[in-house]
Amino acid sequence: MDSRLKVSGHPIQPMLVTFPLGLFVCATLFDIADLGGGPAFLGEVSYWITVAGLVAAALTAVAGMIDLWDVPAGPTRRTVVTFNLVNAGMAALFVLVCLMRAGTADRGANGGLVAVELLALAVGAFGVRLGAVLMHRFDEAADDATTFDALQPTAEISAGTIYRATAR
């Protein structure tokens, strides 16, 4: 599969997926620290980290939809669709948490909201597994070109001159 969105020849979506997931993990850790007796501002910080994670998730979803355009029908396309739906499910759970916290004065979380955040992170972990499967499928062709045999010098004889190539 060839992605339409690339940076230096690498698809953008796998790079973008790490941002919402990392921000959501940070937000959950801040909420756990807040519930554990940490400073009161941790709940507010966690709320805004969640908002930043949702913005990153939206950008990642757009990149995923653009990449989905080029995936041919078959098992790989089903896995890509499942991957995008799982990531959207994780983001939807964090939207729910964010909306429930928006009306509170300190925007802090309670035990129930932290449980929903942990459930969302479990869904995200499944998405990470699907992403690893996809990257393995898409990199199989690249693995063949990066073996040591592909890097062996070759000699070509043309009109009595030997040209050496450093890679095929």
Image (tube, rainbow, N blue to C red):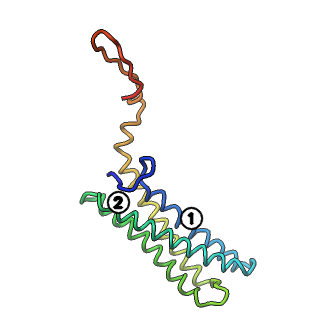
**In this orientation, which residue lies closer to the viewer: 142 or 59?**
59
Q: Position of residue 3 (x, y in %)?
A: 35, 54
Name the residue carrying label 1: 22
Residue drawn at (57%, 82%) of the image: 113
Amino acid beneath label 1: Gly
Amino acid beneath label 2: Asp
Indicate whether 44 appears above or below 23: below
Query: How many callouts does the rendering have?
Result: 2
Residue drawn at (66%, 73%) of the image: 30
Indicate whether 86 appears above or below 109: above
Q: CA distance from mark 2 to mark 1?
A: 22 Å
- Checking the image for residue 42, the label placed there is none
Q: Secondary structure at mark 1?
A: helix
Task: Using the rendered view, name the quadrant where residue 62 is placed.
Answer: bottom left
Residue that lies at the very extreme toward the left in this rendered image? 73
**In this orientation, which residue lies closer to the viewer: 124 or 161?**
161
Q: Residues within 10 Å of mark 1 (few under 14, many from 20)?
A: some
Q: Residues within 10 Å of mark 2 (few under 14, many from 20)?
A: some
Residue drawn at (38%, 30%) of the image: 150
Of pointers 2 and 1, the one earlier in the residue sequence = 1
Q: Position of residue 112 (x, y in %)?
A: 58, 84
Q: Position of residue 93 (x, y in %)?
A: 48, 78
Quarter of the figure with the C terminus: top left
Q: Secondary structure at mark 2?
A: helix
Name the residue carrying label 2: 67
Task: Using the rendered view, name the quadrant where residue 165 is placed.
Answer: top left
Indicate whether 42 appears above or below 106: above
Q: Marks 2 and 1: which is nearer the front?
A: 2
